[in-house]
Image (cartoon, grey):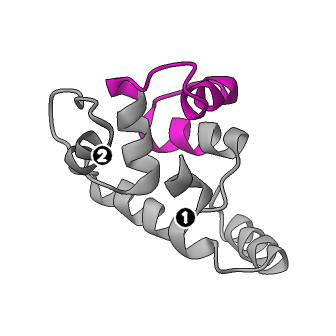
Amino acid sequence: MSMLALRNLDRSTVAQVMCLMSGVCKASSTIVMVRDGVKELDAELLDGFRAVLGVPATVLASLTGVRATEGNHAPAPEVADVAALVREVRHLTEDQVRQLTDTAEELGGE
């Protein structure tokens, strides 16, 4: 969870980004329960966090002790690119992010 905080993602943003990047769609309250130790981290959530963080599932599995789901554990190239963008955006000011968002929308991106 600390790794997510370093990307300036609050709990609701984590839930939204996770759903968009990985297809793992959980309520922000579920993410808070994992953070607070009320709910255990499971393989599905590990996959979601993997996508947002751009970290291989094997690395997160070794850090958490939770086994990843079966299959390819390397992020898809486009997911890795978005994760890198999320990491870099944290260096921008709020006005810069707004300007970047406005430009992307003008160019037809969402």
Camera-side residue of 54 and 34: 34
Q: Is residue 110 above or below residue 94?
A: above
For the residues carrying marks 2 and 1, which lies nearer the camera in this image? 2
Magenta residues, as a range?
17-44
The spot of residue 66 in percent (x, y) is 28, 30
Q: In the figure, is residue 98 to the left or right of 87?
A: right
Q: Earlier in the sequence, mark 2 or mark 1?
A: 2
Q: What label does residue 63 carry, if any? A: 2
Mark 2 residue type:
Leu
Q: Secondary structure at mark 1?
A: helix
Q: In the figure, is residue 42 to the left or right of 19?
A: left
The spot of residue 84 in percent (x, y) is 44, 68
* C-alpha span from label 2 to label 1: 21 Å
Pick out the residue farthest to the left. Answer: 71
Q: How many numbered marks does the figure carry?
A: 2
Residue drawn at the location 28% of the way across and 52% of the way down? 76
Mark 1 residue type:
Val
Q: Quadrant of residue 90?
A: bottom right
Q: What label does residue 86 carry, if any? A: 1
Q: Quick check: is 43 in the magenta stretch?
A: yes
Q: Secondary structure at mark 2?
A: helix
